[in-house]
Image (cartoon, rainbow, N blue to C red):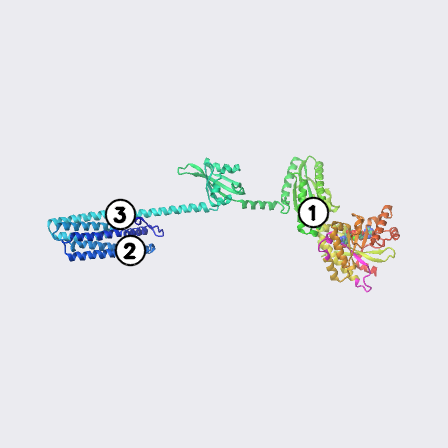
Amino acid sequence: MDELNSATENLSLDVRSRIEYDKLTFFYLSMPIVLIGHLFGALLLIALLFGSVNLESASVWLAVSIVLFLYRFYHYYQFKSESEIKKMDNSDLWMHRFYSDVLLSGLVWGSSAILIFPEGDIMSQMIIILFIFAMSYTSMGNLAAKAELLLLFALISFVPLIARLLILGTQEYTNLGMIVIALMIILVVISRYFGNVVNNSLANHQHFIDMKHSHEVLQERFFSLFERAPVSIFYYNKELEILDSNAHFLELSGAEDKENLLNHSLKETKNSELLHSYMSVFDNNIGEYRGPYTSLISEKLLYVDLSTVPLLDGDGHITGGITILKDITEEVNAKESMVRNAYYDILTNIPNRTLLMDRLSEVIEKTEKKNASASILYIDLDNFKKLNETFGHDQGDLAIKQVAKRIQKVLDTEEFLARLGGDKFAVILPQSKESNFLARDNARRKAQKILDTLSTPLKISGQDYYTGASIGAHIFPYNSDNAYDVLKRAETAMYEVKRSGRNQITFYEESMSENIAEYISIDNDLRNAIANDELAMYYQPQIDVQSGEIIAAEALIRWNHPTKGMISPEKFIPIAEESGYIMELSHWIMERVVKDIKDLSELPEGFPLNHIAININSLHFLSPTFSKEIKMIIEKHQVLAKYVEIEITEGVIMENIDEAVKKMNELKEYGMKFSMDDFGTGYSSLSYLSQIPFDTLKIDQAFIMRMADSHGDAILVYSIINLAKNFDLEVVAEGVETTEILEMLQDSTCNIYQGYLAHKAMPLEKFTKLIR
Ligand code: C2E
Ligand code: CA
Ligand code: CA
């Protein structure tokens, strides 16, 4: 019976087709009971009429009834076993089949009034009329849905009976026929009514299915929206307990499962601003919040964009809030790092030049308003290029980090450190002082602290590395300054320090600008000097003290500047060292001198000297590629290595004694010689002499020049000469300008001298003529 209530939910069909299909199912599924009723009815009728009707006609009629029963039952069976889809496809066919079957039944029952109508037996006639009514009633219910079929059925099943009654002709039969017609009409009308009821109920059922379905669709849509939304959603009650959340929020909170989350209350929120926005829904407001957010569970710090709206019940009362929350952590971080990259130095994580300029402008404005003074320090590390060359850029970076940390440590909180790039830093000392003098005093003391902290060696690759700094200081406001001018002046002062000896503090003065402009123009012009053929190597003879014979020479560079004339190496070599250009310059010098040695070796009498000395500055000598470089040049020009002497100062050795000695030994093995330049000026640590494989020691010209006038200096020179002899070193006295001094040397064991007394440095051509 349940089956009779079933309605199709195949929503691929429209409502009308579904109703048709439901009707079909209803018809077929109600068939067995109807058919069995008809069969029993037929059997019962024949049994009741037994004896009063013709046996033959009765048998035929019963046989037809049974065949029809089987035939229809077969249809029923076929219908039941077909799949729903097929039934739907064939629904028209099934419907026609059903209707024709019903009409057949009607025909069979209608025919009973002719085939088995008992003549003259009123009682039996009444029974047959009753049966025709009863049976047709069961079928008419089915057909009621279709008016034309209903009429046809009524005609088929009643007309024979009515005709039979009217043909009998008596008043009673005519009356009976009229009654049958009246009852038939009533039956049709009532059936029609019930048919409509069935039709309506089927239609309602399908409409209900439609509604149910669209409700389900809505629910699913809402669920998708809630559960799969790419933002976090949760809602909470008046006690601020979380009632439910979507998957996104669970994940964001770091909750293992929903239960884990629902145990928490928003009251635990420590951020009062956030708590306020949760609460604002109870005043019927929308709560908005954007900022840091700590998950209640994982305590992870995020950035969110959140809004929360009142949660209403069916009556429109506020029962809680619905919060939508978007994780903007990545966006915020990206923005932050963009700001950081724009204003902070990546290596040291301290402000960069841009931020410094911003800050400087502010400080200038403030001090100007207050009619006070503040200061800036421009710091440049000494020897940093050398460090980079010697240890590589990674170590250089580490050194810069150490330096930044150290400077930061000696600064007060309001003092502002920035890295300008490379090994350059700046510090703004913003404390305004009433007077220029006080600001100056403050700056000097701070700068001294920075120099002090940098005087302890840096740790580079586990070794101590000594660096210092040159600090240019400037007090502002000066004129009506902008930040650019202020920084520029501090930089100028810094270059002045570099020029005049390093590791000091100097305040900016107007006159410096000129020097610095010159400094910068020399640096620029020098870079074109090689290409423009402005450089030349000169040779100053070294002479045997006793015989007066030229036995060696020192190569000295000369620069003939197109507008400035001769520029002394004492001026441009330090600039090239500072800018790093010295590496290229020094390579050019080696190349040129070795080539000149080659030319001299090709004289018919052969190379007429012991060697030629080349000055190599420490940055170049300590660079990892130096040995390879000089060897390649020597091999390229095919000269004997022993004709090349390298002149380095004591300072070069002291910077990294192990490395320097290792390199010297390697090159000595190769055949080259070494001489120590300017001995006596530096550390003069005589005890080191024995460990360092020098061949020659050059006594600094300052001592030689003072020999004649100062007894002390004379003694010093003699003792250096004796000491050198003890270590089996050749001794060169440099800067001999007078015969008096030469004579003093002739009395000693010093064997070589060099100086204006004999010759100044000269071009190769002149030198060649001199020595032939
Ligand atoms: P230094 O290596 O000590 O060179 C000796 C300097 O003293 C040379 O000056 C030379 O001309 C000068 N001199 C020689 N005899 C006398 C004298 O009797 N009286 C006086 N007053 N001076 C004398 P110069 O050529 O101007 O070189 C100056 C410095 O420049 C050199 O000092 C050296 O440190 C550097 N330098 C020169 N040429 C080169 C070079 O090719 N490479 C490198 N790295 N540095 C060089
Ligand atoms: Ca020299
Ligand atoms: Ca010298």
Q: Do tag 2 and tag 1 residues touch (Cβ < 8 Å)?
A: no
Residue carrying label 3: 196
Tag shown at residue 459: 1
Write the residue at 24% across / 46% down: 193
Q: Secondary structure at mark 3?
A: helix
Q: Secondary structure at mark 1?
A: strand
Badge 1 density bin: few <14, some 14–19, many ≥20, Cα 10 Å: some
Q: Is mark 3 within 8 Å of ligand 1?
A: no
Left or right of 124 on screen, residue 618: right
Regarding residue 480, the answer to whether it shows in the image is no
Q: Is mark 2 within 8 Å of ligand 1?
A: no
Q: Quadrant of residue 491?
A: top right
* Residue 375, above or below 718: above
Mark 2 or 3: the one toward you = 2
Q: Find the distance from the CA under tag 2 to the CA under tag 1.
A: 100 Å
Question: Please, what is the three-letter code of the amino acid marked with disc 2?
Answer: Tyr
Badge 2 density bin: few <14, some 14–19, many ≥20, Cα 10 Å: some
Circle nearer the N terminus (2, 1) = 2
Residue 159: x %, y % from top left: 17, 53
Q: Is residue 576 magenta?
A: no
Residue carrying label 2: 77
Q: Which residues are magenta?
A: 601-627
